[in-house]
Amino acid sequence: MALDPATYRRLAGAFPTGVTVITTLDRDGNPRALTTQSFVGLSTSPPLVLISVGKVARTLDVLRQSGRFVVNFLGCGGEGLSQLFASKADDKFRTVKWRASAAAGGAPILNEHIIGYAECVTINAIEAGDHFIFIGEVIGGEDLGGRPLLYFRRQYASWPVPESQPIALQLPA
C-alpha cells in the first residue's frame, strides 16, 4: 500500500538537503527559473548531475525545450531567493541580479546568495511519477566558497561549520 502524500512529504522532509535554483532561457531569451532541493551529483566521468522538476512547474516546458540550464547553489541568506523562485510570480527576475552563462547558452547565473553554480547541457529527460528527471552534463561552473543554505523539515537552516574557500574549476574543453 502506498503512503499518503502528507506522510511521504514528512518522511522526505526528514532528510536535510541543499537548496538550488535552476535557471534557463525561454525561446524569446527571457530568463526562467524554479527552486528545487532535488539535486544529485551523479557521475564524475563524464561529469553529470541530476535534477527533478514537478510536472506542474511552470518552468518545466521551457526547461525541456531549452536543452541547457544552470544549477545555482544557494548560500546562507538565500531564503528570499528560494521563496521567490518557488512562487508562482510572473516576473521572478524583475529585482534579481544575474549574468548570462557563456557555457549554458545564456542561462542565468545568480549574482547574489550563491556559493557556486554548475552550467549544464541536458542529455536526458525521464518521466517519473509526477516529476521529470533531467540529467545534465556539467560543462562549466565555479565553487565560490561560503556556507550553504539547507532545508530540513520545511525550515531553512545554515551549515554549522566555517565557510569554505573559493575553488576555480578546471574543466576539459
Image (cartoon, rainbow, N blue to C red):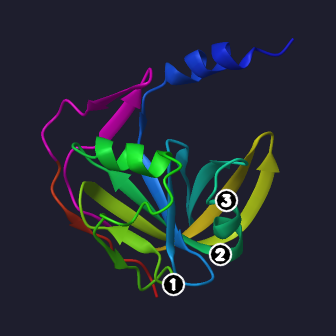
Q: Residue at x 37, y 63 (%)?
A: 117
Answer whether residue 155 is magenta in the image.
yes
* Mark earlier in primary sequence (3, 1): 3
Answer yes or no: do the residues labelled 2 and 1 have beta carbons within 8 Å? yes
Residue 172, compared with residue 123, is above or below; it is: below
Label 3: which secondary element:
helix
> Label 2, on which residue?
67
Whether residue 136 is visible here, answered yes or no, is yes
In percent of width and height, residue 134 lies at: 67, 58
Label 2: which secondary element:
loop
Answer whether residue 150 is magenta in the image.
yes
> Label 1, on which residue?
105
- Indicate left or right for 81 with 45 as reference: left
Measure the alpha-carbon separation of dots 2 and 3: 11 Å
In percent of width and height, residue 74 lies at: 33, 50
Q: Residue at x 40, y 80 (%)?
A: 101
Res. 3 image quadrant = top right
> Label 3, on which residue?
60
Answer yes or no: do the residues labelled 2 and 3 have beta carbons within 8 Å? no
The residue stretch that appears in magenta: 140-163
